[in-house]
Amino acid sequence: MRIALGSDHAGYDLKELLGDHLTSRGHQVEDLGTSDATTSVDYPDFGAAVGRAVATGAADLGVCVCGTGIGISIAANKISGVRAAVISDVTTARLTRQHNHANVVCLGSRVVGPVTATDALDAFLDAVPEEGRHLGRIAKLAALDDELATPIETTEVQAT
């Protein structure tokens, strides 16, 4: 499987460990940066790069790492067609792939240790997206991508 990998400086060490782990499992890894842990960089650049690789088909799945996983997931999710999720354990990793058909996972190097991170990544990669009731929900997510690709008119939002 082709996997795009990216991180900011805070996630660099965990990104490197996960990249080595993915390679050892036989995956083709495209490391989109960053290239060191000491030079401060902006996580949106790397989240978007991974998202673009997945959205264009250059990669089958993506893995992003920053300090918490949150910022880089927000950036990846700005790319139409990306369903990025922050994972923190085997259960969240497995379920986000099975139920949400996530195609990018994001981890926080400051909140998830290396053993948990590799176990969670394996669970994500080994999970199979489920069909049934989940397909309607995935279709709604895709419709949101289409909706947000067009300019949004300013309107009042009414609570339901």
Image (tube, grey):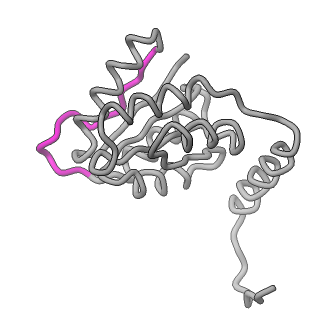
- Residue 99 picture quarter: top right
42 relative to 119 in the view: left or right: left
- Residue 102 picture quarter: top right
Q: Compare residues 116 and 68 and report the one nearer the observer.
A: 116
What stretch of residues is rendered in magenta?
Answer: 28-41
140 relative to 118 in the view: left or right: right
Percent position (x, y) of residue 18? 35, 27
- Residue 100 picture quarter: top right
Residue 17, above or below 72: above
Q: Compare residues 74 and 89 and report the one nearer the observer.
A: 89
Q: Residue at x 76, y 61 (%)?
A: 147
80 relative to 31 in the view: left or right: right
Residue 60, above or below 113: above
Percent position (x, y) of residue 76? 50, 49
Which quarter of the figure is the N terminus placed in? top right
Magenta-highlighted stretch: main secondary structure?
Answer: loop
Q: Residue at x 49, y 25 (%)?
A: 122
